[in-house]
Amino acid sequence: MDLFRQNLRLEMVRPDFRGIPECPLPPGFSLRWFQSGDAAHWLRIHHDAEPFHEITPEVFNREFGCDFERLSHCQCYLQDVAGRVVGTGTAWPAGQCPDGSWGRVFWLAILRSYQGKGLGKPLLSAVCNRLQEQGHQRALVFTSTGRLPAVNLYLNHGFQPQIKTESDRAVWDRVFAALRESGRLREPAALLDACREPTRAGAGM
């Protein structure tokens, strides 16, 4: 079975926030933070972009609750030249880390018709910068083998595979092979070798 259909869970970590890429938005695009009514935009975007899970209002309520003041500081929205909201991502605490040092890139998505245009890069940078501003020292993100463009985006933003078992290593070998075959993966071989090494960052989370 191929990686897309298996959709195996992947964990990636960024051990610090040094060197977050500076990625300018295309002319006319802008970023802003959560405002009243944005839950509807979040649902619309994820309903369009999410290939594996059903997206309902209950999902938003379960993940974020109703503290809209909090969301106004951590949930980012991407707007196109006409002011239409086309992407979103959230800078969220990692619940597995009680000391608060880990933050989480949470529910990052862009409408399918806007994907492949380089818009994920500035959105991800904005979320990582906000995590740092919130006092987190490092970041994690959960993705899956069914989302190879997202995996490549995270690799290019300094995230590394979290490899805890030989099974994890075998899955990541397949991911790297698929990215190479697709022509997406252009990192030097040395970086790929480093990514394959088990990392202690986030161990036990």
Image: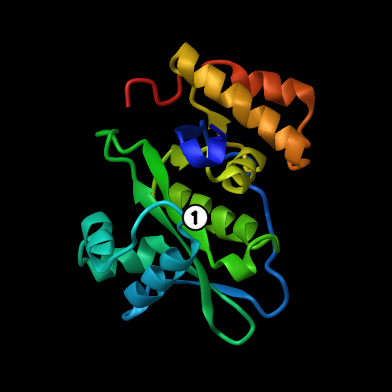
Residue at (54% x, 58% y) in the render: 126
Q: Mark 1: which amino acid?
A: Val
Q: What colouring style does the render use?
A: rainbow
> Which residue is more in the foreground, 56 or 157?
56
Residue at (40% x, 26% y) in the render: 202
Q: Name the image quarter holding residue 171.
A: top right
Q: Residue 27's spot in the image, x, y percent? A: 72, 76
**Which element is circle 1 on?**
helix
> Which residue is more in the foreground, 51 or 85?
51
Q: Residue 137's spot in the image, x, y percent? A: 44, 37
Res 185 seen here: no
The residue carrying mark 1 is 127
User: Which quadrant is home to the C terminus?
Assistant: top left
Instruction: Count residues near mark 1 (Cα–Cα under 10 Å), then give few for <14, some for 14-19, many for 20+.
Output: many
Above or below, comparing residue 69 to residue 14 in the picture: below
Res 153 seen here: yes
> Which residue is more in the foreground, 6 or 204?
6
Residue at (49% x, 33% y) in the render: 13
Residue at (57% x, 34% y) in the render: 2
Above or below, comparing residue 7 to residue 169 in the picture: below
Q: Residue 98's spot in the image, x, y percent? A: 24, 34
Q: Name the image quarter holding residue 38.
A: bottom left
Above or below, comparing residue 183 to residue 126 in the picture: above
